[in-house]
Amino acid sequence: MIKHKGRHLLASLLVVGASLSAQESLTVSRAIQKAWTDQAGLRAGQDMVESRQAEADGFRDLRLPTLTLNAQGVETNEPMMAFGIKLNEARIGMADFNPLILNHPDAIGAYGGSAVIQQALYTGGRITAARRAGDFMFQAEQASQERRKQETAQMVVQAYFGTQVAEQALKWADDTCQWIQGMEDFVGARVQQGLMLESELQRLKAFHAQANAQKADVIKQVRSARSGLGLLTGSGPVEGTLATPLEPETPVSVKNGQRNTFRGDLVSADLQAKAAKEGADAAKGNLLPEVGLELGAGTLHHSWSEKGNWTWAAVGMKWKVFSAPDVAKAKAARAQERAATDMRTFKQQQAEHEVRVAREAVIAADARYLAAKESLAAAEESKRLREARHREGLAPLIEVLDAEAAIQGARTLILQSLFEIRVSRAGLDLATGNPIEGVNP
């Protein structure tokens, strides 16, 4: 029995250990998905979607009848009300027509209630227009939420690979510090032997101090980048390993990036223009006649046995022949329709511009990366030759340090170009409406 429990405990520990190890690494796809589910900003956007959905449901319900229940209790000696109350209670007698009683009735009390059903039969089309406008606004908010998710995904890509750039820079800074320490040991030994000048050792120490300062700055950048990534993903600073490599595994086809797959902002702009048109139609409907049906039933009690009941049915028409505020609202609604239409056109033009710019950015980033790799290879070979000549006493130390500085510059260019490749590809996907890093909302 104990062994059986021990096996279960061991299995549980293995499961927990596996889950902990799984949490140690974070891919860029997982970071994007985590941002979509955990980020408070996107959750607020989803709340807006639900709010628009509730509003759309309310507009759809305008076509349903309304039921109103009234309850009242009254006591009065106002002549007309007193006579009317008795009449509604169905207890009018001959004595009630006595002028003295009619003019100076005693106070009378009553209680009762009514139920009224009202149904619009014709409203100039404004209910139908309002319902369609509500549906369009709901769909527009949904599309806007999808766009916000894609924009967040682009920011996650920037933060994710920005963190990797900083961490790689930190590794290279460690390598530089180790190399300088080795050079200090070598030069220090030569100085003690009288084969090199003390000034060369001091120069190395100054270079070492500069490298340590750069390393401290890079450490700050790493921590800041991880904190920013945690903000986007809805958690604290990210502590695990970033598993997605900085260098892309597959090339991107710029030609395929020209086609818009789905851009939520364009879809939203189109739906907002449609909603504005329906809103203008609804405002126009306020200037047209309205026909409605009303059904009701009422009761008024003097006591439980003395009461009156009645019902009524009515069809009526109401028409604001002239209403300056409604005319002004209709003009404003038409202006809003034109504004939404013009904004839709501008959004489409803006999207085409963004695609062109993003495509050129990808091409330029790829070219810079190829140039950076060539520069790094040349700088490493130059450093190797100069360091060998320095050890033989054939080249001054300054040439070796210049070669190391060239390597650092080439490495910086490598990291910048790789970062630009990742960011520009995400920008191209955002501009064309394609899934960023292949992740679909």
Image (spheres, rainbow, N blue to C red):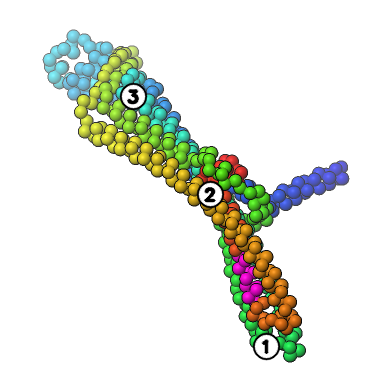
**Residue of label 2:** 359
Q: What residue type is labelled 3?
A: Gly
Q: Which amino acid does label 1 sit on?
A: Glu
Q: Is residue 3 left or right of residue 361?
A: right
Q: What residue type is labelled 2?
A: Arg
The residue positioned 22% from the left and 12% from the top of the image is 92
**Residue of label 1:** 198
The residue positioned 67% from the left and 56% from the top of the image is 241
Q: Which tag, 3 or 1, sits closer to the chain's start? A: 3
In three-dimensional space, the C-alpha distance between marks 3 and 1, rounded to whole angstroms, equals 94 Å
Secondary structure, mark 3, is loop
Q: Is residue 365 magenta?
A: no
Q: Is residue 75 left or right of residue 416?
A: left
Residue 294 screen position, x and y as percent: 32, 18
- The image's mark for residue 125 is 3
Q: Which tag, 2 or 3, sits closer to the chain's start? A: 3
Residue bounds of the magenta highlight: 401-412
